[in-house]
Structure formats: C-alpha cells, structure tokens
Amino acid sequence: MNVWQSIRIALHALRVNKLRSTLTMLGIIIGVGAVIAMVAVGAGAQARVAEQIGSLGTNLIILKSGSATSGGVRLGQGTQLKITEDDAVAIARDTAAVQVAAPWVRGSAQVVSGNLNWSTTVHGVSADYFEARDWSLVAGRPIWPEDVDSAAKLALLGQTTTLNLFGEADPLGQIIRIQKVPFTVIGVLERKGQSSHGTDQDDVIVIPLSTAKKKVLGASQANPRAVDNIYIKVRPGEDMADAESQIRTLLRQRHRLQPYQDDTFSLRNLSDVLQTQEESSRVLTYLLAAIASVSLLVGGIGIMNIMLVSVTERTREIGLRMAVGARGYDILMQFLVEAVTLSLIGGGVGIAVGLAGSRVISYFAEWRTLVAPEAIALAFGFAAAVGIFFGFYPARKAARLDPIEALRYE
C-alpha cells in the first residue's frame, strides 16, 4: 500500500467521525493561531522600537553636557554647560569617522500666528542639523549657514505645530511671533512621529542657532558658546564604538581633563540603545511564542488520545487487514498519516486564525503587528512535527497487534 492510499483511507476515517476530528484539531488550530498572533505582536513591537530610534537619525551619537555640582549636590545631566559650538567644529574636523556634528539648543516658547497661538518646543540649530538627524522637508528650504551667521529670523515648523497654527492653510512665507519676535516661515519638516520616550517630535519649531541664543532663548552668561547637545552623525560603514572612543579622547583633550577626572560630558550611542531595546523585544517575542506553543503540545496530546481510541475501536479492522496481507508497516503508515493529516489540516486553519487574530489585535488594541512568513512556516512545521511525534505511538501500537487476537477482539 502506497502513501496516497494511506492518505485516502485516513481522510475517509476522519470524515466518518467529523465532530471528533474537529474537536481533536481544535488544540492544533488554537496553538498555531496563538503562535502566529503572539509572534506578530512581538515583531510589531521590535519594528516600532527600531522606527522610534531610527527617527532620531541613523549612525547617531548624541553628545550631552555633564552634571554640575553645587554644595555637594549633583544637579543632573545637562546642568554643566561645558560643550560648545567649537567642540562641534573640532569633532567634525578632527575625527575621521564623523560625517557632521550639529550643535543644538532648545527651549519652550509661546508662538502666535494671527489669532491663533500654540506653546511648543523651539530648537536652535546649525545648518548640519538636518543631515545629522536625517530630517527632510515636505515644503520650503532648510536653514543655510548664512542664516546662522546673520542670525536670520527664519523658522521651520513641525507637522503638529503647523496644524495648530495654520490648520490646512499653507504656512510658507507667513509671519509668526516667537516670544514677540517676528519670524518668517521658510519650510515645513517631514513627519517624525513619537520618539522612544513618547514625546511628539513634530511639535517643534526650528530656528537658526545664533537667532535662538540672541533673540529667543538666550545664551549662557558664563559661556555664550555653550550648547545643550551636539548631534554627531558617523559615516556609513564606520564602527560606532570606535568613533565614540575617538570623540571621547578628543573632548577630554579639549577640556583638559586629567586621567583621574570624570568626563564633563556624556556620549549616547543610539546603536547600543537600539540593540538593547531590540534584544528586549526579541526576548518578549520568544516568551510569547513559548507560552502559545503550550497550546500545540496540548493539541498533540489530544491527537494521541484520539488515535489510541481509534486504534481500540478499529482493532478488528486492523486484524482483518493483516489477515489479507497487510504488513505492520502498512498499518503504521495508515495511522501515522491519519495523525499527521489531522495536524496539517489544523495547522492550515490555525494559520488563517492567527492572521485574523493579529489583525483584530492591531485594530482593537491599536498595537502594531507584523506577520513574518518565517513565523507561519515555523508554526505550520511545528504542527506537522506534533502530529508525527504524538501519532507515532498509537500507530506503532496498531502495527504491533497480533492478527489473530485482533480478529477475536469484541
């Protein structure tokens, strides 16, 4: 008897007991569907993390000011304004791995446009800021070096700020007032979405760095050249850790720090942050998949139980087949194919359930899901493996029945 005959006999046996076959497959259906849906949730979380980190810019290192100390109390990161515009120039000039270094200051301000107003974040930036952040425009032009040199009163708006100040109207060429200072809108930034901290990156106004210091946010009295951060973009293909080490060495030399002294600045490598968060998301995905896989094991045990019952019910049939020449191998294949067929049909239905479930989760929970073909293949293959593993024992038991005893079975 060949495999095709075994499959026909198996399908006939499953059709005879439709309700029992359906209930047996239910565990496999739930298991495969749960695995696909849970892996989709985890993969969606990983993709979201990657997007949020990537929205800050690729190959990016953020240089921040260190912590100042007053009366023995450390005031926190960013309170010791030691990094300057000159540091940004030196980093871009003296570090071979660096593509651009963009100094940046920020503050909050009330912005007025006609009879509308909006409280938002103001960024004072250099011309290299847009390249460092990989931030393009949907309209207008970016800030040019001559705008920074002349402290021009020009502004670019984020998508959220544009909507709240102008609605659907075109903001280009319009006049807005930031802290009562008039600015001309020269561009609208592309949408960035939320950052990894959950803040809206599109709720922003970008103006030249010199303008921000002189006319809007003010400059440090102790060091007018000081900035809050420097965004450093590393050239593609360069090692981020090596670039970070080079920048740290250069800054320690510029700030005249002795070997025993702590850094007066901090470097944040976003590649390390991305890797850490991706690993956390991956662990979450594996955990969800492992929990969902328990359903597959339960389904496999259900298959084994039903197949053992089927062997008992069909003992006389097995004896009759052996009496007319069927070998033990033929009986083994018949019951094994029956178990695998149950698993494969259950796996196919489970894939449909998993795809539908991931869409339902995405719609109602507003949680992004990402179904990978590898997850579908893995869940389906695991379902087949469960059928083989849990179906082998009942099939082997059937194949080892004594024909004479089987014929006598009532």
Image: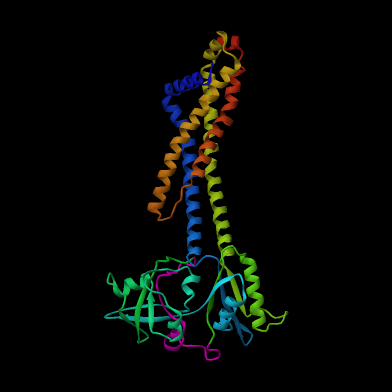
Q: Position of residue 77 (x, y in %)?
A: 57, 78
Examine the image and state in which quarter residue 78 appears: bottom right
Establish if 321 lies above or below 57.
above
Is 90 a magenta residue?
no
Residue at image position (44%, 52%) is: 369
From which residue to which does the magenta span run? 196-224
Q: Position of residue 265 (x, y in %)?
A: 61, 78
Seen at 52% across and 32% down, the residue is 302
Q: Nearer the viewer, residue 33 or 182?
A: 182
Q: Is residue 7 left or right of residue 394?
A: left
Front-most of residues 371 and 146: 146
Can residue 77 be seen at all in this image of the molecule?
A: no
* As drawn, 289 above or below 237: above
Identify which residue, 188 or 280, lies in the foreground.
Answer: 188
The reply to whether residue 132 is visible in this rendering is yes
Q: Residue sitting at 52 percent across and 29 percent down?
A: 340
The residue at the point 27 percent across, 81 percent down is 114
Report x, y in % for residue 140: 36, 73
